[in-house]
Amino acid sequence: MTFEHFQKLVDMMFVPDGAGGALQRYQEVNPRSLHPLVLAYIGDAYFHLFVRGRLLSYEQNKVQVLNQFSAQMVSAVWQDKAYHALEPMLTEEEIAVYKRGRNCKSRVSKSASVAQYHSSTGFEALLGTLYLQEDNDRLYEIAEAAFQVISKAMMEEVAAGQKQP
């Protein structure tokens, strides 16, 4: 980002209040008008925070362990698996948001297949949309269901790895 671009953003965000301070301007954002990658950006941030908060139920002292576990849980591979498990519980509108995010062009991670990465982008776009719509009950329901799917699948993978010589 250039300095000029940064300065323009700052100028748009703050307006003098006449007393030497600054008032933040806030405008409601319509998720339908946002680019799917912006929705995924918000959804990714939400899911990261959600997972980190949920992991505190299991570990409160070892930040490195929390960080490694949360990074794995929010990976494209696991988000893809979660989405496919949750798809039957989604509405047609939610699936349409997912598809809009899945189908947009973006860079692909080296740690996931192209399909998994696009799927996780769609999942994050769905979460971002629900967050911006302030549909907190539905957002929590989907994030919690995803957390349960991912944690169960991760434990099954660990158990299967321990059984093999």
Image (cartoon, rainbow, N blue to C red):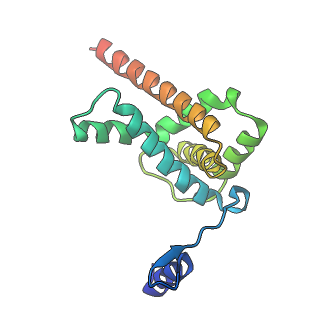
Pick the front one: 67 or 108? 67
Note whether 134 is above or below 23 in the view shown.
Answer: above
x and y percentages locating residue 40 in the rendered image: 57, 53
Residue that lies at the very extreme toward the right in this rendered image: 92
x and y percentages locating residue 2 in the rendered image: 45, 83
Q: Is residue 112 visible?
A: no
Residue that lies at the very extreme toward the top in this rendered image: 163
Q: In the visual, does 153 lie left or right of 35?
A: left
Pick the front one: 94 or 57? 57
**The N terminus lies in which quarter of the figure?**
bottom left
Picture quadrant where residue 61 is located = top left
Q: How many marks?
A: 0
x and y percentages locating residue 54 in the rendered image: 41, 32
Picture quadrant where residue 90 is located = top right
x and y percentages locating residue 21 in the rendered image: 45, 80
Identify the residue at image location x=60%, y=27%: 85
Identify the residue at image location x=63%, y=47%: 134
Pick the front one: 63 or 71? 63
Note whether 3 is above or below 46 in the view shown.
Answer: below
Picture quadrant where residue 88 is located = top right
Q: Is residue 140 visible?
A: yes
Identify the residue at image location x=57%, y=47%: 124
**The C terminus lies in which quarter of the figure?**
top left
Identify the residue at image location x=60%, y=68%: 26
Q: In the visual, does 76 lie left or right of 125?
A: left
